[in-house]
Amino acid sequence: MIFAFAVAPVVLITLLIGLRGVAAMRTTSDFLVASRRVSPLLNSAAVSGEYLSAASFLGVAGLVVKDGIGSLWYPVGFTAGYIAMLVLVAAPMRRSGALTVPDFAEARLASPALRRVAAVVILVIGGLYLVPQFRTAGLVLSAVSGTEYWVGVVIAGAGVAITLALGGMRAATYVQAFQFVLKVVLFIVPAVWLLVVVGPAVRDEAVHPVTFTHFDHDTPVNFRVGVTLDVAEPTTVLTDGQPLTLAPGPWQVGAGTAVTFLDGTRVPVVRGQPLPGGPGWQRPLLDLQHAGYPLLGTWALLVSLMLGTMGLPHVLMRFHTSPDGRAARRTAALTVGLLSLFYLFPAVYGVLGRVLVPHLYLSGATDTAVVALPAQVDSGMPGSLFTGLLTAGAFAAFLATSLGLVLVVSGAISYDLLPGGLGALRVAVFGAATTVVLLALMAIRLDAGVLVTWGFTVAASTFCPLLVLGIWWSRLTVAGAMSGVLAGLLGSAGAIAATLFGPPLHGWLAILIAQPAPWTVPLAFLTMIAVSLRGRPPAWAQAAMLRLHLNEDRPVARRVDFGRDPGHSTRSSRRSSAVRRMTGRLVR
Amino acid sequence: MPAGKRVAVMSPQTRHAHSRRRLRGRFRVPKLDPADEGRALTLYHAQRRRAAAPLVLMFAGMFGLPLVFAVFPGLDHARLAGIPLSWIVIVLLPYPGLVILARWHLRRAERIEDDQ
């Protein structure tokens, strides 16, 4: 019911705008020429639309419920990344004519091998970013409509793959800009409604956090995955309607159990997770891994987010729809403003969620806090309406990001890694979607915000040094770039694997392994510089770098230009470029 | 029309695929017109010089604010309109700061290009 009411309209309107956009595009000779007329404001709405993923729409509020006010550093870092993008990357990247980082590697350093390594990095970042999107789609659908988790994940995967195969990325700019407006409205209006409806008592509780120690009403909790709870005192609960008295000690809850905790009983503790609202909860610092070093944890997170944004493949692709480098720079600057508007509101859902739905902490489903809130406040028609609106917004967030990422990932597979044939892209889309669905089915325990942040970390340790040094340092060599990217990739991916599969760590070491950006980013930069200094860049390296800084928007009569409009950047129409080839194919 | 030259007729899609495969791997050495080179060098140095300030400001702000929170835990207990002061600061301070920083740097970067 909620699905038909909330999700179907989003998908339908997205498809309609896409088709309408195609009709407009067909009147011009070339899809890409038309898209080059996109104004900075429209384009920055599209960038924001693509950027605001399920991690922003649901994940931040969920992390606030679970870990505390310090989680509000996530959106600050997400926004600050665009300052680094604006200052260092936006205009030169647009002027390089490269759509993706593999393209950039080939345009700046002329190395097919580096192109393939960059494509592998895109697969890693895309995987880390896509899995939480699919997972959240599964969680949200199961939370609002009671279906199994895997149903939502499979529906999401099928939706993305079919939309892309039908050419859903056509007129992508209009679709993404629409999605941004949709997401902002569907996020802000329910937030204001919630603040008004909850009443003064809840508002007062929200700003005076207390530890969630006792249930204040009969609370049903659905455990979708098994978990070990520590019960402190004999507690009576209802499992599947039958009363069950728990002895103090660990209690293994099986996957798929529905438990109702009774009013006034004591809340059990999840292993390794402090109760929401505890002493550290209201601190505006993020105690990563509960290691006891909140300042270090916050800084490590910010390094990753601020430097990782410039390497996100789906965001870089969007900058290419700007007419020139100058418009790309304006797009980055306007995006800071648009994101700032959106990110004022996750805090509202977070602090209200801690009061109204703290029990989501038990089942590890805090990511659904946003969509669970309206039903807690109003059990009638308005509650259902706002649940529907928020579900629609969450689905829009999931869809916008996933479409762009699946396209970039499939492009990397079918063009940069394998010799691309005509059907390869469509096969790659289905292959990528299937792989992500399988990974998402296994990743139900991992929070969206955490996984997405790891995507930023890998981007910051690989693409950030490659782009920054490639754009601003003419002495960069292929060997240097290659060893730097590999060092960053191995360091960050190894640390993430150690966090997922390794033994539990404590203290500052736990932070530097769970969020390795503070050492992997310098490691990648230093490796790149040291290896480059030992080699010699080719004679044309200076020219390859300088042309990225030439403002092409001033037409120069003597410039050698083979019949192309001077508004476009140098030689991009002849550069091979995965996504242009793909969009060209999908449009035809 | 000169005779003898035979052209294969194929769908644009096929042509696209073929040309893609042939273009792949061929690299043209980037060249800059001497006049452009001088201008590009000036622009590069000017932009590089002006890139430092906004980055330093951003990192100082982003690392400084958590430090302030860590050094002055009293901000959590001070309240403005009933809301802890540190909560207000973390939500309402960074975003306007970032917007102003973006606007300021955009102006400077564009002015360099206008002058050239």
Image (tube, coloured by chain):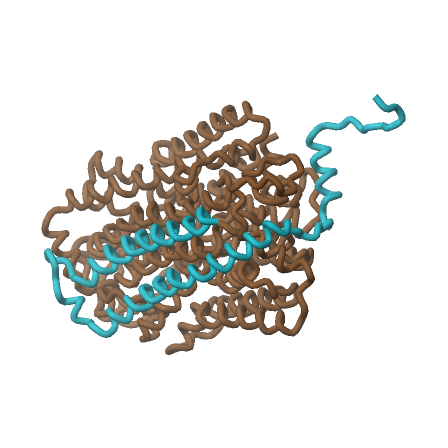
Chain colours: A brown, B cyan
Is A488 situated left or right of A383 in this image? right
User: From this viewpoint, is residue B28 visible?
Assistant: yes
* Image location of residue A247, percent across then percent down: 27, 69
Q: Residue at x 40, y 45 (%)?
A: A48
Locate the C terminus of chain A and report the quarter of the image it occupies.
top right
> Could you tell me residue B16's position as x and y percent?
69, 35
The residue that appears at 25% across and 47% down in the rendered structure is: A373
The picture quadrant where one finds residue A186 is: top left
| Residue sitting nearer the eye, A357 or A186 | A186
Q: Position of residue A190 (x, y in %)?
A: 24, 41
Q: Position of residue B106 (x, y in %)?
A: 39, 50
Give above or below for A573 relative to A447: above
- Relative placement, left or right, of A110 versus A270 is right
Q: How many labels sit on residues?
A: 0
- What residue sits 55% from the left and 44% below the top? A407
B20 or A414: which is nearer to us?
B20
In the rendered image, which quarter contains the N terminus of chain A?
A: top left
